[in-house]
Image: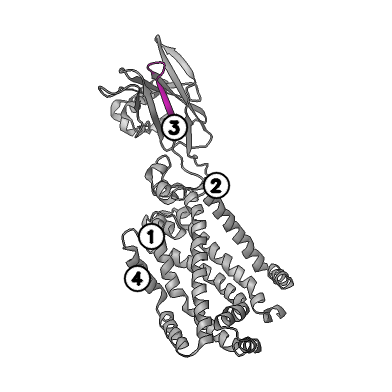
Amino acid sequence: MSVTRSGWQIYISSLVGKAGLILLIFMVVASIYVLATYPLDYGIRVWSNPKSWADNPITVPPTWVDFFTGRDLVTHHITITTTSKGTETIAGLKFKVYELDYDLEEDGFPTYLMIKIYNVSMYSERGVYFVINFTRPDGDEIRLITFAEVPPPNSDLPYIAFSKNEKIIFLSKERSVGFSLLTYINSKYNLNYTIDKLNEINYNKVLFGIPTEEGGEVVWKPLKGVYKINVYMLGEDKDNIAMLKAVFGGESYGFLGTDDNGRDLAQGLLFGFPVALAIGFFTSIVTTAIGASLGIISGYKGGRVDEIIQRISDVVYNFPFLPIIILIVFIISRMPGFPRLLAIFGAIVALGWPGLTILIRSMVLSLKQSQFIEAARAIGASDRRIMFKHIFPNLAPFIFAQMIFFTPGAILAEAALSFLGLGDPNIPTWGQIIEESFRAGAALNGWWWWVLPPGLLIMLAAITFVFIALGLEPIVNPKLQER
């Protein structure tokens, strides 16, 4: 117990050891959070599913870049309602009213405005009639669009419309919305725009701004304040909308921005923590177990067993690691239904054990001449008992340190293979995210938030285990304690 306590005190007294332990705890906590909150099939169900990201803006930076650019980027915003706020009588007709609010605080315009309608229950063959109005902070109300929805002929009632695919209305692109906005700005600001100017009007600027004249030209400035989208539904009293969603496109999103599919990079990078730890730990454990076992057997047994193990080790050890591992993963990953991550795991293990086997053999050759080994033989201890009850405990600290050293190598190998396009596209690993960013030209387009964070996380993972291994060196090699 005192030996264990002494080793822990030596480790914790090292600055790099403490830094490595703190970083490892951070990675483990992040991994536990992901495993507790993410579905196990997150890669297929969410990450690779375009519908999961349909409401997100494409390739926008994180929200915190405002602190460095000096420009107040419009933050992406989604408003949802599932209940009506009551009814309103218009021209003798009673409408159900649903309200969606949006507070514009930035000095800019939303990039788009989209309405989504889900699961409309209709209890009459006449269907329902929708009116969508837009109220600005200055009190002006604009009727943007009207449309009707009726059940198909001979359908059972109540009929649920938009149950499989929601009704999507791009208010920033609908031509009928353009006519309404043209009428509004002509009457409000006396601009006298004609219909042929409709294609020149920026719907978002008209919706969220006010015109000013600068140098003889009309320039739109953002109008800050609370905007309201009112969706009026005319139908039976039982008719209902299950959910309404308004998406106000932003110039920034979340903590780490989005990629070219609108995917939240923070989610993908967070999911990479347990994947990286799993690849690193399991690969290093298996590689170390194989290498150490063969090294102990080779060094202790000697003779033909030693010759066979050492010649195989020499051959495998002298293989060029990266080209061979690329070839192995490429061949195995082409097998139908074979997981690519498992192929990467197998390839790293297959080529990673010989170095440790050679090192352990040389250490066993000197250990087996020790007096305690001779004493064990004298009392009739079996070879298996001597190898794993007497030799292995003396090598355990070194073997454990080597296992820690193997871990960052496995993580970097997976990242390199994923970067070369050999990773699993359905699992967001850090290497896979970097590969997708380069394939999309992120570096050329200046989308740094798609390239730098995964690269920094790979480096963080590698540094974590290097620090831990450096902290263990004084324990493994007592001569370093004197220094």
In terms of secondary structure, where does tag 2 sit? helix
Tag 1 near tag 2, CB within 8 Å? no
Query: Which structural element holds mark 4?
Result: helix
Q: Amino acid at mark 2?
A: Trp
The residue that disc 1 covers is 339
> Between tags 1 and 3, which lies in front?
1
The amino acid type found where label 1 is placed reads: Pro
Write down the residue under mark 4. 327
Q: Quadrant of residue 29?
A: bottom right
For the C terminus, the quadrant is bottom right
In this orientation, does residue 112 appear? yes
Q: What's under tag 4, amino acid-wise?
A: Leu
* Front-lying residue, 235 or 90: 235
- Rendered view: 292 above or below 161: below
Determine which quarter of the picture holds residue 7.
Answer: bottom right
Classify 10 Å Cα crowding around label 4: few (below 14), some (14-19), many (20 and above): few
Task: Classify mark 3: helix, strand or loop.
Answer: strand
Give 301 or 123, whichever is nearer the viewer.
Answer: 301
Q: Mark 2 sits on what residue?
A: 64
Q: Please name the residue shown 43% across and 58% down the image.
A: 434
Residue range of the region highlighted in magenta in the rendering:
234-245
Q: Does 38 appear in magenta? A: no
Looking at numbered disc 3 in the image, what kind of residue is underneath it? Answer: Ala
Q: Earlier in the sequence, mark 2 or mark 4?
A: 2
Residue 246 — which label? 3
